[in-house]
Image (spheres, helix red, strand yellow):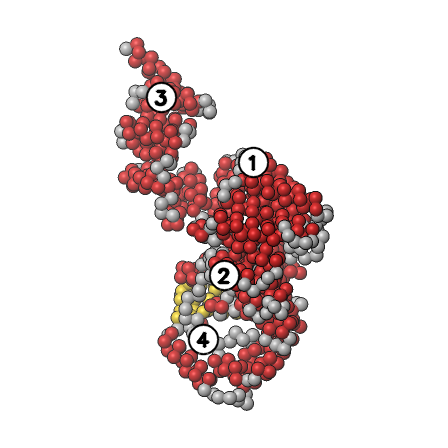
Amino acid sequence: MTGHYWISAPRRRERDRLRAGVELPSPSAAADAHRRLRGPYSATGALLRLVAPEALRRRPELADRHYIELQESTPELRPLVPPIVRALERNAKAPGEASRYPARLHSLRIAHGLVDFLLAALPDADGAPRTLVVENVQHADVTDQEFLAAALRRIPAELLTLVVCTDTGTPAEPPGMVSVSLPEALAAHTTRIAGPAAAAEAEAQAEAQAAAAAGPEQNDDREAAALYVEGDCTGDDPALLAAYERISAEARMALHDRRAGTLAARADGEPSLKLGALPYHLLRGSDRDAGLEALRWAQGRCKYLGFYHAAAELGEDGRHRVDPAAQPDLWWTFTRDTCVCLAAAGRPKESAAVQEEARAATVVPLHHMSLAYETGMLYARHFPPELRDERRARAWVNQAIAISDLLPDPKERAFYSVFNRNGLALVEVRAGRHDEALRLLDEGMARLDRELGIGERTWHRVGLRYNRAQVNGMSGRFEDALADYAQIIDADSDFADHYFNRGSILRRLGRLEDAVADFGRALALEPPFPEAYYNRGDARLELGDAEGALADFDRTLELEPGHVEALLARAGLLADLKEPDAALQSVAAGLRQDPGHAHLLCLKGRLLAEQGRPGEAREALAAALRSDPELAEAWAVRGELAYLDGDLTAAVSDFDRAVELGDRPEFRFNRGVVHEAAGGYQQAVADFDAVLAVADDPEARSRRESCLRRAAERVQA
């Protein structure tokens, strides 16, 4: 057998036995994906710490290309790559003032960037691993799941064979919105080798029962418990776990203290430990406050990097360890960030439950203001469409505004009043009231300029202008939006979204070369994301750069194979390049994602017609028109088929409908040809005149002259 493997069995030792029976490329490396070890990217970071230093020495250009994903996934690599610069934070008046948080899909983009890095680094890397064994994937953080899913699909097993090891079940999808499915990737891209589950489970139960029946603490329990703790309590040996549970609470605490000390001594050089094992052991040691502080720092760091599932899990742990009456500030930090991160991770119902629980636990006005705002955002944007509710969103945000307007400190009152009205502007946008949203944003910007000093809350001033740019773009005020983006980029020059959004506006204005440049800048400031490649490809296509457009569409589909619009665009381009078989393959891939996609069905009909398969073409066109009866292209292609069949009456009728729905020169030209064939010379001349009004088409001119002659001959006859 060749390819990637998925080995599943209840215990690690059984998985090791199964793996020993598989012939794998050497040398090999092992990584443990248990998120308790280093939190996000526990396994991915282990691979990168092994491979990246030598790869960056050998190919230093990779540092500039992948600096974001390398240091965000594996902070130990930070000294080897250029630093990430956030202009807003560098210029902030208040140290630590946040500027913005990444999008939910940022971690998936990191995963693809890391796959790109490995595809570039491994082919000429002597001594690099050719097999990677990843253990405990059932306990992996979402970030490791995303990386493994991308790597299984994109990395050839000949370059790096991945051996994914889990317990007997299929790894569960993470809660909330799923960016990419590891279970689907395992099913599609691995050979599964499963142990005899029933026998193994029986053996495991017998071992666990024997360990539990051992009674009070034994002489060697402390040694066994120490082994369990030194493995960061991730082992699945029931004897070690039983020994750990038999020793006294004081003895367990001492073991955790010792392990925490060891990890703390390494943490400066291995900062990823601070997101996993270090806070875990500190929380179970003798210094509870140190543990809570370590947990709080880890949650804040994960939130800052956009690792929202991890941040939410850390926050849940923290808020249940803290009494809101005894430590209100710490409890609130854990609670607030948990609410925000659950919503950002696509888990709004869980966020709503935490918010409701928090409201019952605090009487602090600022807390209720923040909770009201966050609940309003759930109803305005985070809930699925069927649960969104403009009235409830407005009610909750109005409550936040009412509290903020009563704050005693004038600067706090100004900031929070504007901040909450910014949320109300979002509600207005969702309700389609763009002018009211712009009024709120304009008033907020003016108030901050009037009541806060220069440099205070710069990130929020930029955020208001960013929101205004988006509203201007939505409402067709493109020049105003461009003016806003110019000021935004002047203050916040290293954020990809600004260039992506501005490029989209430039594209709509027909400034295609400027749009291509902005999309390229966005791609340089963020790990690879398919939307920017697709938009740049679309602009390149209109510029006549077929080769560049095809490369961008191919790249889009490399990152997101199910991107339907990229499949359609690629298929249309291949059809124009006279590659019908490849075009039909793209059409088929798109229809697997969306069987009723009218434009794909129409293109399928066109391609089948060109291949001389009229019956199949008509079926595809009929399906297209069932999906979208007003799709002009489908009527036009159907008219061409009728013309080829000699049914000129049907052809004229279909082209009439196409011209009615979309008066394009090519539709007019083809209808003119049909009119000419049917002897309707005056109607044909009218169509050819319409074509010549927008383009100097020699064939249209020639046919027009022919029709005029034949019409004159008919009159003379």
134 above or below 530?
Answer: below
Give the residue pinned by disc 2.
353
What residue is drawn where x is 43% and y is 38%?
A: 577
Residue 573 seen from this side: yes
Q: Mark 1 falls on what kind of element?
A: loop
Label 4, on which residue? 11
Estimate the spatial distance between the alpha carbons at disc 1 and disc 3, rounded to whole Å: 41 Å
The x, y position of residue 259, in whole percent, is: 61, 76
> As shown in the figure, which amino acid type bears the numbered disc 4?
Arg
- Any mark on residue 3, and which? none
The residue at the far top in this view is 716
Foreground: disc 1 or disc 3: 1
- The residue at which mark 1 appears reads as 477
Disc 1 and disc 4: Cα gap in Å?
Answer: 61 Å
Residue 684: image tag: 3
> Considering the numbered disc 4 on the image, is that residue within a helix, a strand or a loop?
loop
Report if the CB atoms under discs 4 and 2 are less than 8 Å apart: no
Q: Measure the alpha-carbon separation of dots 3 and 2.
A: 68 Å
Q: Which secondary structure, mark 3?
A: helix
Pointer 1 local density, CA inside 10 Å: few below 14, some 14–19, many at least 20: some
Residue 149 in sight from this viewpoint: no
Say which quadrant the N terminus sits in.
bottom left
Of mark 1 and mark 2, the one earlier in the sequence is 2
